[in-house]
Image: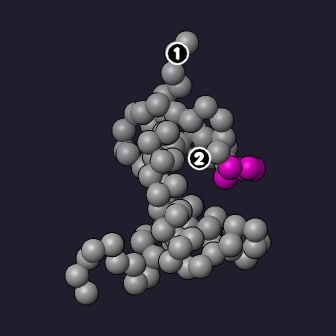
Amino acid sequence: MSRRVVQCVVLDTEAEGLDVPPYPGELGERIYNNVSTEGWRQWLERLQMIINENGLNTGDPQSMDLIERHMVGFFFDEGEYGGLPTGFRAPGAKK
């Protein structure tokens, strides 16, 4: 079975693509076509940080709207989101 390869916007190189769209709708298709499995893994790490730093609830539509804005910023550098959460300090980092 051959692997699906995409030009990953996160890694800026060709890499193994996702098996299925990881998110519903047009955004999910866009991610499927432009993000590798490694790029998606990096997003999941960032997502955990975003949820924790902002106290988000994935069952809340307003939280999901913010998550989507971060997702578009992270993957496609669109909008004002996508960077590390404001005030984020890595564990063990000096003040």
Label whose residue precedes the other's in the sequence (2 or 1): 1
Can residue 79 be seen in this snapshot?
A: no
- Pointer 1 residue: 2
Q: Nearer the viewer, residue 38 or 28?
A: 38
In space, the residues marked 2 and 1 are separated at their CA atoms by 20 Å
Q: Is residue 62 above or below residue 26?
A: below
Say what secondary structure mark 1 lies in.
Answer: loop
Please identify the quarter of the rendering in which residue 7 is found.
Answer: top left
Please identify the quarter of the rendering in which residue 66 is found.
Answer: bottom right
Amino acid on which the number 2 mark rests in the picture: Ile
Its colouring scheme is one colour
Please identify the quarter of the rendering in which residue 83 is found.
Answer: bottom left
Give, as a single range, the part of the protein colored magenta: 23-27
Q: Residue furthest left?
A: 94
Q: Position of residue 47 (x, y in %)?
A: 53, 62
Q: Of discs 2 and 1, which sits in the foreground?
A: 1
Q: Position of residue 40 (x, y in %)?
A: 51, 47
Q: Residues within 10 Å of mark 1 (few under 14, many from 20)?
A: few
Q: Position of residue 36 (x, y in %)?
A: 48, 39
Q: Quadrant of the C terminus?
A: bottom left
- Pointer 2 residue: 31
Q: Identify the residue at horizontal 46%, vertical 76% (top origin).
A: 85
Q: Quadrant of the N terminus?
A: top right
Amino acid on which the number 1 mark rests in the picture: Ser
Please report contact status of discs 2 and 1: CB closer than 8 Å, yes or no. Answer: no
Q: Identify the residue at horizontal 47%, vertical 57% (top origin).
A: 45
Q: Is residue 57 above or below residue 21?
A: below
Q: Is residue 71 above or below residue 63?
A: above
The kind of secondary structure the magenta stretch mainly shows is: helix
| Residue 24 located within the stretch drawn in magenta | yes
Q: Identify the residue at horizontal 63%, vertical 75% (top origin).
A: 56
